[in-house]
Image (spheres, rainbow, N blue to C red):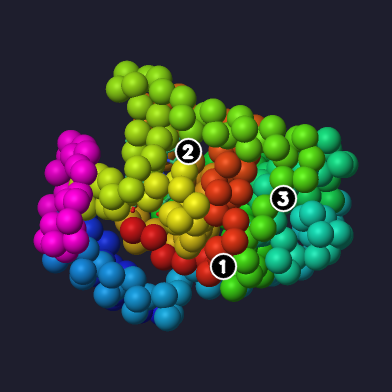
Amino acid sequence: MKRAFILGAAALLAAGMPLQYVLAQSGKSAENAAAAKSKQAAEFAQFHDELEQDNPAELFEMKGKELWQAKRGPKHASLERCDLGLGPGVVKGAYVQLPRYFADVGRVMDAERRIVYCMVTLQGFKKADLAKQPFSTPDRTPDPVSLVAYVAAKSRSVKSATPQNNAQEREAYAVGREIFNYRAGPYDFSCATCHGQMGKRIRRQDLPDLASKQQAINGYQGWPGYRLTGGLMHTLQWRMNDCFRQQRFPEPGYLSETITDLLTYLAVNANGHVYTGPGIKR
Ligand code: HEC
């Protein structure tokens, strides 16, 4: 594990970041775009490539695998009978077909929501306990985070194919699209304000156009991901939560319907792209 690289990159990224948001349209011509690519971005790209070859996310995949197979919880059961949509116990390829409709609960669920559902029903954990501190901190990586990493890794190199086969799945997509475009809050921001056009940047970070077929995959690629900022493993539940915060919206509840709908919107937009597995994020 290239710890020195991780620390170096984190320090690099922490340096020189202005506090205020600088919402910038990057240049229109290729020339301008190239000029806008800062030295820092190039250095980050290099760190990123080196790290991906020796990916810290793999530690969490391994931990997740152990958690998946171990008999745990009040019911002393493993998650090996958990149905992620392809039948009980089938993990390979399941992540890139989520969120999807589950007849046993009569609703659409994303990966983390379904995994927590299995922890509750099969192992007897309490959802309220799992929701208390759902995001990684320097002291603790919650079990669902490692489990999502394991499940996601089993879809590495598989094409995204989130289904739109029934009314519930289509509704989740439609509601997700509404939320994505809904402007409110003190700055009148929507997700689309930051993620609805090509070539937008905040500070030095490129913001993908998540409404486009071409770039929507960026919303999924590398998630769950090991974030150099802070050195923590995070899932898309965290990413959504943090973007609600950036949008100055009230934070949604952990595993809420709103997040599932948004993730359905993002996942379906990203269909057809090959998912490369848990990765590295800044
Ligand atoms: C104020 C601007 C802003 C708003 C509004 C915003 N985001 Fe973000 N979003 C960001 C920034 C900044 C990042 C981090 C980019 C990076 O680290 O490279 C990000 C990252 C993401 C990513 C991960 C992209 C990647 O390349 O890994 C997703 C997915 C995402 N946002 C979705 C959303 C959704 C859904 C909403 C609406 C609920 C939203 N964002 C609202 C600024 C915003």
Mark 1: amino acid: Val
Q: Which residues are magenta?
A: 16-35
| Residue depicted at 42% across the width and 35% down the height | 191
Q: Position of residue 165 (x, y in %)?
A: 77, 45
Q: Choose mark 3 or mark 2, whichever is in front.
A: 3
| Residue depicted at 46% across the width and 25% down the height | 182
Q: Dividing the picture into quarters, in which one does residue 38 lie?
A: bottom left
**Are the residues at dot 2 and dot 1 in contact (C-beta closer than 8 Å)?**
no
Q: Name the residue nearer the viewer: 114 or 177.
A: 177
Mark 3: amino acid: Pro
Q: Quadrant of ligand 1?
A: top left
| Residue depicted at 39% across the width and 60% down the height | 281
Quadrant (top left/top right/bottom left/bottom right) for the N terminus:
bottom left
Residue at disc 3, secondary structure: loop
Vertical relation: 22 (above or below) 206: above
Q: Which is more N-terminal, label 1 or label 2?
A: 2
Give the Cα distance between marks 3 and 1: 15 Å
225 displayed left or right of 257 = left
Vertical relation: 131 (above or below) 222: above
Question: Which residue bears the numbered disc 3?
Answer: 163
Give the Cα distance between marks 3 and 2: 24 Å
